[in-house]
Structure formats: C-alpha cells, structure tokens
C-alpha cells in the first residue's frame, strides 16, 4: 500500500481510503471484519460524514463496532464531513460546531484528523466558517480542514478567511465519470461537449495549491447508478480493456479501476465504498500499480472519452 504525506499536514496516509457511507445495515462483526481487512491491506484512512445513514447513523455504527486503543487511534486517520442537512445545506458556525460534536460522540473519538465541508453552501459566510474552524482547531477537536465538491473559486473564497490550510478536496472521479480529467484533455475543441470546463479547473488548482484530491465513487458509472465493472451491456469495450490489463498485471478488474486513479501524478486518494472485504483487498492491489501511458489512455477512450 502506497503511503504519502498529505501536503500541509504531518499525516502519512494510505492512498486508498475506506469510505463508510454504506455500512448502516451491517452488523458489528461485519463492520469489524471490513475495517480489519482494510487495516491488514495497509489502509489507515477512514471517510465518514454526518449525513451518511442520516443524522450520524453510519458514524454511530462505526463507533459502536470498532474500538481503537489510544495507541491504535494515533495510527489511523478519521475524516468526516459537515454541511448537508435534510433539504438544505448549512455551513453556519452553529451547525458546524454542533455537527462536529455529534460526529466525535458517534465515532467515540476525541478528535477528527480531517473535517471537510461537504457540498458548497451558497449562503455561506466565509468569516463564520473561519471562526468555527479556529474554535474546533484550538479545542483540539479537528486537526485539519478541507472541502468536497468545490471549485477553485469557492475554495479561494474560503482561503481568504480561513486561517488553516485547506488540505483536501473530495470529488467524484471514476474511469467513466471523469470530467475532472477529460475536460482538460479535450481543451480548445469547438463543438465537443467533453471540452466544456465544468469545474473551473479543479485538477490544476489542486496540484498548484497542494490540495489532495480524494476520488469518491471510483467504481460507479455516474452519480449512484451502479458499477461499470462487469456492465457489458453499456461498457463492453471498457470491460474488455480492464480484463486484459488486469490479466497482464495479475490483479482483478477492481484493482485496475483503482490504479487508473492512483496512476495520475496528482497523488490522489481513492475513496472505496464497498462493504465487501474481498473487494477491499482487491482494490488495495491498485494502490501502487503503475499503469503504462498506453494502458491508461486505452481505459480512458474505452470508457467513451475522446482524445481529439
Ligand atoms: N464527498 C461526497 O460528496 C461523496 C459522495 C458519495 C460518496 N462519498 C464517499 O465515497 C465513498 C465511496 O462512494 P461509493 O460507495 O459511491 O463508491 P464505490 O466504491 O464506487 O461504490 C460502492 C458500491 O458499489 C458496489 N460495488 C463495488 N464494486 C462492485 C463490483 N465489482 N460489483 C458489484 N458491485 C460493486 C458496492 O457493493 P458492495 O458493498 O457489495 O461491494 C457498493 O454498493 C463513500 O463511502 C463515501 O465515503 C463521498
């Protein structure tokens, strides 16, 4: 498992993260097995959100099932998010503070290693967010801060007020949902939908500013509409390419889907959402698997993206 120091922190993190959005219906033993499998594979970074399962429910399932001794707690990194509420988004100081307290209680931990602002609340007041972050940081409740699904402009607006570095941006990225990379590859092309810049250059902004991109839904076709792996009806060419490249490297297709992201020199982390321990193992084999340029671009075009 590849580890690297997240810029702006002293966190030496695995480049594969276990996301816990889907654990609501797992029993304690299944959660422990999932987490232990991840730890055995070298994963030390765990992604939560207040909203997963509704009202901190997935965080609570994790906290109820998994106990870290204080020495173990220092070897793992717990990240959570705040901002999505029932029918509206909320980056108010009051909500950030109360939500973090509820996350700490649910996770049974004294601090979060990273707190992300989940989706951009257009009603945000950057000074309020800055005050909330400083309160949380000074109280030892949150070590580092970041954003999720946010453009360079939104991040810059926050950076003008927030004292701490914004160290991560968690964004949707898979071989098939790849605007983030595909738009730049097709830059400067009239009449080609792929060349439309939909996020104002999140990729380059992150690289220029030492913000680690965390890729969520690495196996999903689009926005929560199922996995592309094995979907031969819609992605026959892609699955052929994945299967051949997987066989050439002696890994599973799951590892190739991960490697397509970890191969990128932006040093991204991949946020797995599987609840299946075998898939966690399979995915981990993609942590440090350097696809060749021809392999990487073959997967890109087989997914339907264009090289103009
Ligand atoms: N920041 C954000 O806005 C945001 C949004 C969404 C998610 N996230 C984070 O990202 C994590 C990952 O998101 P995700 O769960 O959507 O990503 P994902 O890992 O792409 O999808 C996981 C889902 O796909 C299924 N799956 C995976 N591989 C499969 C295969 N080969 N065949 C059949 N089914 C397969 C899993 O089922 P099994 O469990 O049975 O394997 C699970 O239901 C979440 O846990 C969360 O931490 C962040």
Image (cartoon, rainbow, N blue to C red):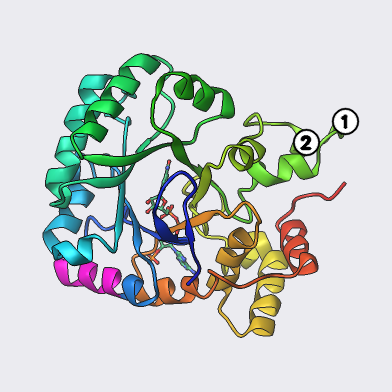
34 magenta-colored: yes
Magenta highlight: main SS? helix
Neighbour tally class for label 2: few under 14, some 14-19, many 20 plus, Cα within 10 Å: some
Drawn side of residue 250 relative to residue 237, left or right: left
Give the camera-side residue of 8 and 235. Answer: 8
Q: Name the residue under label 2.
A: 195
User: Relative to 189, is 269 above or below?
Assistant: below
Q: Distance between the residues labelled 1 and 2?
A: 8 Å
Give the camera-side residue of 22 and 131. Answer: 131
Res 102 seen here:
yes
Q: Does the residue labelled 1 lie within 8 Å of ligand 1?
A: no
Residue 220, horizontal then vertical, whole percent:
52, 55
Secondary element type, mark 1: loop
Res 124 seen here:
no
Neighbour tally class for label 1: few under 14, some 14-19, many 20 plus, Cα within 10 Å: few
* Residue drawn at point x = 75 percent, y = 50 percent: 305
Where in the image, quadrant-wise, is ligand 1 located?
bottom left
* Residue drawn at point x = 21 percent, y = 70 percent: 32
Residue 77, horizontal then vertical, whole percent:
31, 56
* Residue drawn at point x = 26 percent, y = 58 percent: 23
Q: Name the residue under label 1.
A: 190
User: Relative to 236, is 225 above or below?
Assistant: above
Disc on the earlier residue, 1 or 2: 1
In contact (CB < 8 Å): disc 1 and disc 2: yes
Q: Is mark 2 within 8 Å of ligand 1?
A: no
Circle count: 2
Residue 200, horizontal then vertical, whole percent:
65, 29
Q: Write down the region rendered in magenta.
A: 26-36
């Amino acid at each position: 498992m590849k580890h690297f120091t997240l810029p702006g922190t002293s966190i030496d993190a695995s480049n594969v993260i276990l996301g816990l959005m889907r654990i609501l219906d797992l029993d304690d033993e299944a959660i422990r097995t999932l987490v232990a499998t991840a730890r055995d594979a070298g994963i030390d970074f765990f992604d939560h959100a207040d909203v997963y399962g509704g009202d901190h429910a997935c965080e609570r399932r994790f906290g109820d099932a998994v106990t870290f001794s204080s020495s173990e707690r220092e070897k793992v990194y717990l990240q959570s998010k705040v901002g999505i509420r029932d029918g509206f988004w909320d980056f108010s100081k009051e909500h950030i503070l109360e939500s973090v307290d509820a996350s700490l209680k649910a996770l049974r931990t004294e601090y979060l290693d990273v707190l992300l602002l989940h989706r951009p609340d257009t009603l945000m007041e950057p000074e309020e967010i800055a005050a909330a972050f400083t309160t949380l940081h000074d109280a030892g409740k949150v070590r580092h801060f970041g954003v999720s699904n946010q453009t360079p402009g939104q991040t810059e607006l926050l950076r003008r007020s927030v004292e701490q570095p914004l160290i991560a941006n968690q964004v949707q990225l898979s071989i098939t949902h790849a605007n983030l990379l595909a738009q730049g590859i097709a830059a400067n092309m009239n009449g080609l939908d792929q060349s439309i810049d939909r996020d104002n250059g999140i990729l380059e902004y992150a690289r220029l500013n030492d913000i680690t991109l965390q890729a969520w839904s690495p196996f999903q076709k689009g926005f929560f509409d199922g996995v592309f792996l094995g979907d031969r009806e819609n992605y026959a060419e892609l699955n052929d390419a994945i299967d051949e490249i997987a066989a050439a490297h002696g890994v599973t297709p799951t590892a190739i889907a991960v490697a397509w992201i970890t191969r990128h020199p932006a040093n991204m982390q991949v946020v797995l959402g599987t609840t299946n321990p075998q898939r966690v193992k399979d995915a981990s084999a993609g942590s440090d698997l350097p696809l060749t340029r021809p392999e990487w671009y073959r997967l890109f075009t087989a997914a339907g993206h264009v090289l103009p």
